[in-house]
Image (cartoon, rainbow, N blue to C red):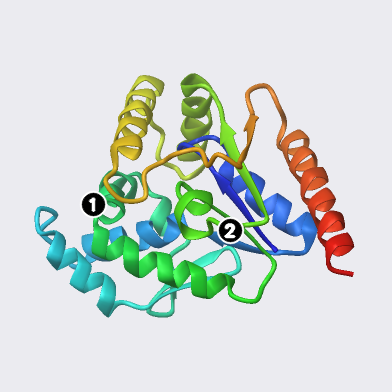
Amino acid sequence: MIVTIDGPAGAGKSTVAKALARRLGFRYLDTGATYRAVALAGLRHDVDWSRGDQLARLAEQVEIKLCGDRVLIDGEDVTDAVRSSEVTAVTRFAADNPAIRQLLVELQRQAATGQNVVTEGRDQGSVVFPDAACKFFLTASPQERARRRVGDFRTQGEPQPMDAVLADLNRRDREDAARPVGPLVQPDDAIEVATDGLSVEDVVSRLEAIVRQRQTAQKRQNP
């Protein structure tokens, strides 16, 4: 079974997806980390960000792997490195590149083949896994999402002012919605879950109950 969790930045996708995967005994896929990995590789190789073909060639040359909740570049664990504000600022160059998206969508599908998976991102239910058995779309107000991101940056030792983080989130929302490939959209068959005022435990429990209902229904259909 494939469970997709989509939504805007700061909606709690990663935290919820990891916890849900643990509850269900599923594999967790952080697909956004693959684009961040390409961006990190671009920073390290000093690419010209205005040259999309240059970044696409680099994406083909490096080996990106998703191992549990870790992401590797050429065997190096870069899970923490890809979350830096420097990488966040240039990830859009990877996410907006059609050639890179095609490459990484295939990588994501291969990683999920034959497995029970909880996968999260911005186009999982709409593009990568349109036939997923269970789709969720997490939302939260811009202010709540900005508050969470400020906390994330503080934990990473990169404190950021609230106003700047909120402005960046609003910009990313506009860019994600207008992206020519893999835009952020809510699939028609996705269940929307607003996470404002809810604890992680509350959200995960709600999603888990729905997934287990779907599992039971599948078993009845395919005894």
Q: Are marks 1 and 2 in contact (CB under 8 Å)?
A: no
What residue is shown at x 87% (from left), y 56% (from top)? 216
Residue tagged 1: 93
Helix, strand or loop under label 2: loop
What residue is shown at x 25% (from left), y 59% (from top)? 98
Disc 2 packing (10 Å; few <14; some 14–19; many ≥20): some
> In the image, residue 147 lies at what x, y percent?
51, 25
Disc 1 packing (10 Å; few <14; some 14–19; many ≥20): many
Q: Amino acid at mark 1?
A: Phe
What residue is shown at x 36% (from left), y 19% (from top)? 163
Decide which of tag 1 and tag 2 comes sooner along the chain. Answer: 1
Residue tagged 2: 131
> In the image, residue 184 lies at what x, y percent?
41, 41
- Does residue 210 sit above or below 58 in this rendering? above
Q: Nearer the viewer, residue 158 or 131?
A: 131
Residue 153 lies left or right of residue 22; in this view the side is left
Tell me the CA gap for discs 1 and 2: 28 Å
Q: Nearer the viewer, residue 166 or 124?
A: 124
- Does residue 150 sit above or below 13 in this rendering? above
- Asked if residue 46 can be seen in this view, the reply is no
What residue is shown at x 41% (from left), y 62% (from top)? 34
Q: Nearer the viewer, residue 119 or 168?
A: 119
